[in-house]
Image (cartoon, rainbow, N blue to C red):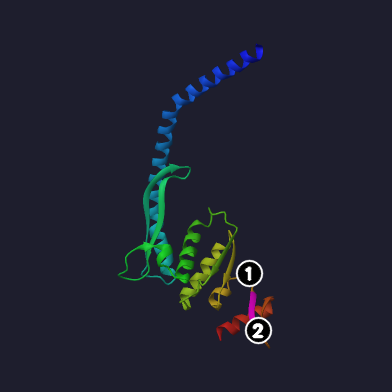
Amino acid sequence: LKIAQVEIAKLEQTEIELEKLQRQLPILSKEINNRADELSKKRKSSAKIMEKEIVKILSRLGMEKAKFKINFSEKPLDENGMDNVEFYISTNPGEELKPLNKVGSGGEISRMTLGLKTLFSEADRIPTIIFDEVDTGIGGRVAEAVGELLFNLSKNHQVICITHLPQISIFANNHILVKKEIKKDSTQVNVLKLDEAMRKMEIARMLG
């Protein structure tokens, strides 16, 4: 009998807690929606600043005609808020803005990523960033600007960059030479870490 009474008491207490939670639900729902709306407003305000800054960086990276826009659309509320966010870009005059993942070449996406990482470098906690083809279609002063941005990015991250340009490679702290050799009927890939003297020789060879 005592066990039954304890179980009944537990059920009654559970019903009381459930009623309490049901009364709190509309209040909490309203608060969550208010906070999501506030977050969305802050995102859209920050997006306008970000659009301008990205265009400035892309111009330095040889994409002077690029246009960049952050588009927002509403989604069902979850732990990330109520916004779907998508990056749109146009890299050539007369082209309409399209989603970044549908229009960018490998080099353009690498430079776009470099621009974004430059903006977010202090807040982003990703430890290692790898860039490939970031030097596609560039040279001279633009290549030097890419090297400078990579160097600044390396202050907060480990940066690995595959490049054929001396203007970029001179900014690195460590250099690794990758060479493909064909011997008889086999192909070998050799990887060699360069010391200071070898580094100078390789950069000179790249200049040539």
Residue 59 found in image quarter: bottom left
Residue that appears at 66% across and 12% down: 2
Whole-percent x and y of residue 66? 37, 67
In the rendered structure, the answer to whether residue 167 lies left or right of residue 191 reads left
Q: Name the residue under label 1.
A: 173
User: Which of the numbered marks, if any, corresponds to residue 191?
Assistant: none
Q: Which of marks 2 and 1 is in front?
A: 2
Lower sequence index among marks 2 and 1: 1
Q: Between residue 158 and residue 183, name the one nearer to us.
A: 183
Whole-percent x and y of residue 125? 57, 54
Name the residue type under label 2.
Glu
Name the residue type under label 1.
Asn
Residue that appears at 46% across and 42% down: 78
Considering the image in quadrants, where does the N terminus appear? Answer: top right
In the rendered structure, the answer to whether residue 166 lies left or right of residue 90 reads right
How many numbered marks have been drawn onto this rendered protein structure? 2
Q: Give the range drawn in magenta.
A: 176-180
Classify 87 as above or below 166.
above
Q: Between residue 162 and residue 83, name the one nearer to us.
A: 83
Label 1: state its secondary structure.
Answer: loop
Residue 76 found in image quarter: top left
Classify 204 as above or below 126.
below
User: Which of the numbered marks, if any, corresponds to residue 181?
Assistant: 2
- The crowding category of the residue bearing disc 1, from other C-alpha atoms within 10 Å (few below 14, some 14 to 19, many at least 20), is few
In the rendered structure, the answer to whether residue 199 lies left or right of residue 22 reads right
Label 2: state its secondary structure.
Answer: strand
- The crowding category of the residue bearing disc 2, from other C-alpha atoms within 10 Å (few below 14, some 14 to 19, many at least 20), is few
Q: Is residue 76 among the parts visible in the rendering? A: yes
Residue that appears at 64% across and 80% down: 179
